[in-house]
Amino acid sequence: MIQNMPDISIQAFDYELPDSHIAFFPSQQRDKSRLLVHCNDSISHHSFQHLPDLVPTDSLFIFNNTKVIPARIQIQKESGTTIEIFLLKPLTDNIATQQVMEQRSEITWECLVGNKKRWKLGETLHKTIQIDGEAIELKVCWHDREINQVQIQWSSEHTFASILNEIGKIPLPPYMERDTELSDQDRYQTVFSKELGAVAAPTASLHFTSEVLEQLSSKGIQQSFLTLHVGAGTFLPVKEDEIRNHPMHREQLIFERDFILQLTEHQGTFIPVGTTALRALESLYWSGVWLLEGHSIPEAGLIIPKEFAYHDRQEVNNTDALLAILSYMDVHLLSKWVAQTELLIMPTYRFRFCDALITNFHQPKSTLLVLVSALIGDDWKDIYDEAKREGYRFLSYGDACLFFKKEK
């Protein structure tokens, strides 16, 4: 019930962000971006390459290893009209998206469609591409025009990942209002990206280089990886005045068994890298609570509702929640925990797996900024004001922050 969620207006998360403060292109070097650190009500300024010296040595860094797919497809009709198809999510039940990318011959996706009015029901789009000298015919038709579901077929045994690499473009955030450039193919992916499925990058991780990761390891700081496939909904503005009425976007989560075990054993500081890693970690906890409360797992897979964390209930220990998941995996012979989340994190939320957060500077009136406020309170306003005065670059290609959780 959303009535259990706090009644907070999105207007409290508005601020002025002129274009002059937005990074429309990446910095020349990943780890040479700036890093603002907020701890115990004080702010300090650093270069990102010095991050390993700024965190406790008992830390566990949790990264999101999702990989952005070239989700923008343009197909020209015989009339000359261009139809743009932006892939959002495959129409598959509880199957990891990276497995879907290995499908052959045909696939169906939910999409955003540009120039939709020029693409009629029953009309098939055609495109010929070349892979390794082989001519491949693509046919694209409506699966369900009313809800923007599109079927793609191709005349070869190549995987959909191979097809997409040939015809698609990396999707940049809509506010950039520019075409994808060659450099974006590299810089809009993290250095550890692995699992295909995101349509937006986990941008806090874009600052990390192999050198920074090695320095963390040399200090005994642990690193672990989960997968949350970032969806286009991450850019959706909050149009409702009450944040709790916002239709929170759904994203897929994938956790290896060893990752969950590592969480149960770690006794030190938890540092998720990015809001996606944080949302995934918290959703993992609520997956365990779901099981402990006796709820069944639907055949199509578990979806954590946005309001589930705000129900009145007896507190569940972190370890107990994780052990419930591991027990379920044992009984059902699962090597991975796959679920989806609509969790909305807002002020009054109590974090289970976050002592500090690495993140970028977020858009006004966004759910990401609301999440940051849940962690550090209203201090975000003074922090953002100082960042603008100091010339920090904002949004996806911008500079980074290290926020230590504000104790309540």
Image: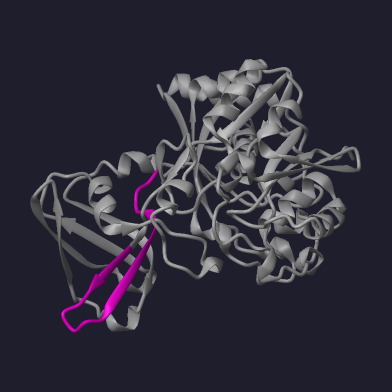
Task: Give the extent of the magenta segment.
Answer: 73-94
Residue 122 at x, y percent in the picture: 19, 76
Vertical order, 164 against 141 (above or below)? above
Tell me the quarter of the picture where residue 29 sits. top right
Total numbered labels? 0
* Quarter occupied by the N terminus: bottom right
- Asked whether residue 79 is drawn in magenta, I would say yes
In front of the other: 182 or 349: 182
Residue 379 at x, y percent in the picture: 87, 51
Residue 173 at x, y percent in the picture: 52, 61
* Quarter occupied by the C terminus: top right
Residue 31 at x, y percent in the picture: 61, 39
Residue 43 lies left or right of residue 286; in this view the side is right
Asked whether residue 317 appears in the rendered view, the answer is: no
Tell me the quarter of the picture where residue 19 sits. bottom right
Give the residue at x 41% y 41%: 299
- Asked whether residue 399 is drawn in magenta, I would say no
